[in-house]
Image (tube, grey):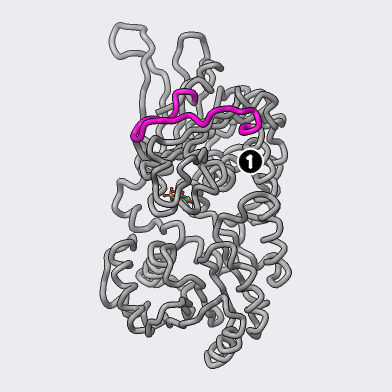
């Protein structure tokens, strides 16, 4: 039995809470997840009673929870949820919050900052008036700052109040089932682990393609862009898991040590033009809250090199973009052809929307012919209803991990710092070199220049 906890959400009426957090709690309740011995306090400025809030939240659960809505399950969750009206920018309001918590007995705190980072400092200051808060855990969302400097200052603020190992920086990609599976696929299969290096692999391609545009987030996105919004965090996390040495254990420290080695070995490209392509979808400048002259990139493709014994000389191509022809996230490993003219073997780890593994290899064409053709094995993991049922959604999994104190699937400050340094530098160089942000049509595969990034090195994007 875990100790009674209070899980407090700052930003309780925001999008993230409705779309991800409350549905995640519902799924946990439906699975009778034993981590959920917690009261959930939802803090928002709007004037709701707990009853009204529960009533409103149930509609979001119906819409966004992974598991079908059942009244009796929601009722159980609702009993744990209390709405607490408060202006969290008002320092004096924290005295009352402290009194409110005291009425709940001796508990451990978990705070979830589902608010913009500019509010973090003010909340941390206020929480100094809440007894026991500094011993609690805190979960924060990306963006961790807008650049290295802002991220460092944000981190300093958090670390002055919370213990370092009580700060959980969520990167929801680390909660995705197939991202968790990369290590198993790599290390539990000698047919892959023995050839997982530049000697046998020609290139690795990491793609996160989206159909959606910036939607209602233009104000945030226009100051961010694809490099900061997706590459610096989600895609670099995946890159390090794909490229790292096998950690000694599954524990947080061993895993982070190996991921950090990869980040530290990232080579800064000498010729930015040969290694980066930025693009913007047509019509982006007309999106709500986007600057009419914006040159913010909604697409980025980068050719990366990792300077270490395993990867010397082998490119990693990493790309992401919005308003593309399809939604697809995958890691494609393209092996070297054994003899010229024979197709390469390809292992494709499919992260979303299909979760699975595709393997392409050469066989003899059946019959009298000696022609070499490709066998294409396609394993779909989430095609099975049972697998779908048993696979927690990213937030569900990460909230559970935070409650249990498991830190290996959260971002650490040094990872964030190092990836910011890299992304800040390449972004600045790109713009300083006067390189264009290429326009691409909505629904396309992105800017043509991104094909050339590979084409010049004899590669093509694996689709
Ligand atoms: C978020 C980005 O972190 O991830 C969004 O800010 C992006 O711009 C989203 O759309 C993608 O997440 P998912 O889980 O839909 O791939």
Question: Which region of the structure is painted magenta?
Answer: 430-449
Foreground: 313 or 268?
Answer: 268
What quarter of the picture does the C terminus occupy? top left
Q: Residue furthest front?
A: 292
Among the 4 quarters of the image, the one containing residue 394 = bottom left
Residue 272 location (% of width, % of height): 64, 27
Residue 67 location (% of width, % of height): 31, 63
Determine whether 417 is above or below 318 in the image.
below
User: Which residue is depicted at the point 40% across and 82% down?
Assistant: 47
Determine whether 457 is above or below 160 in the image.
above
Q: Which residue is mark 1?
A: 423
Among the 4 quarters of the image, the one containing residue 121 = bottom right
User: Which residue is depicted at the point 46% across and 73% down?
Assistant: 34
Instruction: Determine the main secondary structure of the stretch shown in magenta.
Output: loop
Among the 4 quarters of the image, the one containing residue 260 = top right
Foreground: 415 or 294?
Answer: 294
User: Which residue is depicted at the point 59% across and 43% down?
Assistant: 236
Determine whether 129 is above or below 310 in the image.
below
Q: Is residue 44 magenta?
A: no
Q: Is residue 433 magenta?
A: yes
Q: Residues within 10 Å of mark 1 (few under 14, many from 20)?
A: many
Determine whether 450 is above or below 91 in the image.
above
Asked if the residue at label 1 sits under 8 Å from ligand 1, the reply is no
Foreground: 392 or 93?
Answer: 93
């Amino acid at each position: 039995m875990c100790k009674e906890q209070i899980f407090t959400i700052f930003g309780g009426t925001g999008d993230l809470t409705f779309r991800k957090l409350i549905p995640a709690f519902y799924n946990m309740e439906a699975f009778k997840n034993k981590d959920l011995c917690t009261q959930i306090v939802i803090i928002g400025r709007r004037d709701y009673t707990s009853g009204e809030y529960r009533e409103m939240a149930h509609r979001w659960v119906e819409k966004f929870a992974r598991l079908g809505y059942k009244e009796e399950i929601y009722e159980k969750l609702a009993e744990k949820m209390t709405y607490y009206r408060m202006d969290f920018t008002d320092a004096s309001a924290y005295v009352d919050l402290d009194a409110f918590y005291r009425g709940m007995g001796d508990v451990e705190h978990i705070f979830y900052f589902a608010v913009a980072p500019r509010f973090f400092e003010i909340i941390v200051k206020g929480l100094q008036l809440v007894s026991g808060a500094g011993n609690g855990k805190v979960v924060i969302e990306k963006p961790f700052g807008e650049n290295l400097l802002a991220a460092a200052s944000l981190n300093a603020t958090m670390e002055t109040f919370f213990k370092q190992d009580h700060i959980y920086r969520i990167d929801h990609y680390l909660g995705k089932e197939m991202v968790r599976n990369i290590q198993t696929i790599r290390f539990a299969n000698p047919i892959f682990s023995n050839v997982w290096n530049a000697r046998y692999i020609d290139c690795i391609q990491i793609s996160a393609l989206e159909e959606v545009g910036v939607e209602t987030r233009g104000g945030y996105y226009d100051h961010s862009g694809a490099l900061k919004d997706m590459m610096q965090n989600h895609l670099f996390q995946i890159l390090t898991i794909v490229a790292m040495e096998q950690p000694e254990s599954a524990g947080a420290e061993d895993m982070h040590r190996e991921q950090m080695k990869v980040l530290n070995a990232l080579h800064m490209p000498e010729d930015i033009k040969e290694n980066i392509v930025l693009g913007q979808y047509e019509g982006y400048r007309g999106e709500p809250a986007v600057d009419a002259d914006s040159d913010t990139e909604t697409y980025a493709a980068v050719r990366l090199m990792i300077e270490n014994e395993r990867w010397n000389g082998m490119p990693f191509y990493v790309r992401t973009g919005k308003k593309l022809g399809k939604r697809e996230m995958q890691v494609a490993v393209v092996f070297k052809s054994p003899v010229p003219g024979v197709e390469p073997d390809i292992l494709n780890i499919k992260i979303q929307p299909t979760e699975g593994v595709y393997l392409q290899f050469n066989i003899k064409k059946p019959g009298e012919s000696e022609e070499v053709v490709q066998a294409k094995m396609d394993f779909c993991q989430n095609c099975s209803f049972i697998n779908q049922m048993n696979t927690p959604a990213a937030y569900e999994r990460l909230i559970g991990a935070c409650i249990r104190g498991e830190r290996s699937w959260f971002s650490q400050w040094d990872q964030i710092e190092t990836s910011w340094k890299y992304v800040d530098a390449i972004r600045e160089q790109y713009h300083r070199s006067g390189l264009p942000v290429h326009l691409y049509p909505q629904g396309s595969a992105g800017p043509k220049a991104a094909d050339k990034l590979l084409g010049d090195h004899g590669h093509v994007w694996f689709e």
